[in-house]
Image: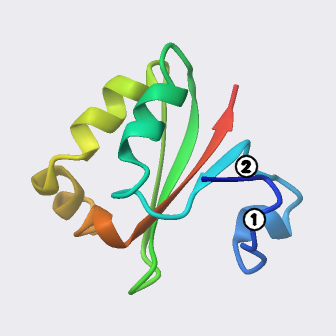
Amino acid sequence: MENNNSNIKNNNFINKGIIPLVTYINADINKSNIFKENIRKSGVYIWVNKINGKSYVGYSTYLTDRFSNYYSLSSLKSKGIHYYTSCTIKIWSF
């Protein structure tokens, strides 16, 4: 996991001055931290496929519940993300 100093300069959100609260570089390796660190939190998040550059933006009142759904491969495939092992997750809290 990296904080908001991570090297993601080409991201459109960064270009607009919106910096994520936290960035998980590898959604597979950081799965347990993603769940543990976002219990009872709400926020905006973006899944970014590091292979093809496709992304999916969403928001939730309960991030942990939403992420548990996204770790289902069928859910990610339906959003064009495909395999979470090649994804980065960025989270903005609200």
Percent across and percent down for residue 60 are 47, 27
Quadrant where the C terminus sits is: top right
Callout 2, which amino acid?
Pro
Q: Measure the C-alpha gap from mark 2 to mark 1.
A: 9 Å
Q: Which residue is mark 1?
A: 6
Residue 14 x/y as whole percent = 80, 64
Query: In the rendered structure, which amino acid carries the disc numbered 1?
Result: Ser
> Does the CB distance between marks 2 and 1 fall below 8 Å?
yes
**What crowding class fits label 2: few (fewer than 14 Cα within 10 Å), some (14-19), or many (20 or more)?**
many
17 relative position to 46: left or right = right
- What label does residue 29 carry, if any? none
Q: Which residue is mark 2?
A: 20
Identify the residue shown where x is 58% and y is 38%.
44
Q: Position of residue 72 (x, y in %)?
A: 15, 47
- Horizontal arrangement in the rendering, residue 36 relative to residue 72 (left or right): right
The x, y position of residue 29, in whole percent, is 38, 57
Q: Residue at x 52, y 27 (%)?
A: 38
Q: Which quadrant would residue 25 be assigned to in this image? A: bottom right
Is residue 45 or residue 30 the one in the foreground?
Answer: 30
Image quadrant where residue 26 sits = bottom left
Other-residue count near label 1 (Cα within 10 Å), few / some / many at <14 / 14–19 / ≥20 = some
Q: Earlier in the sequence, mark 2 or mark 1?
A: 1
Q: Which is more toward the observer, 54 or 5? A: 5
The residue positioned farthest toward the bottom in the image shown: 52
Q: Is residue 12 above or below residue 78?
A: below
Residue at point 80%, 52% (across, down)? 19
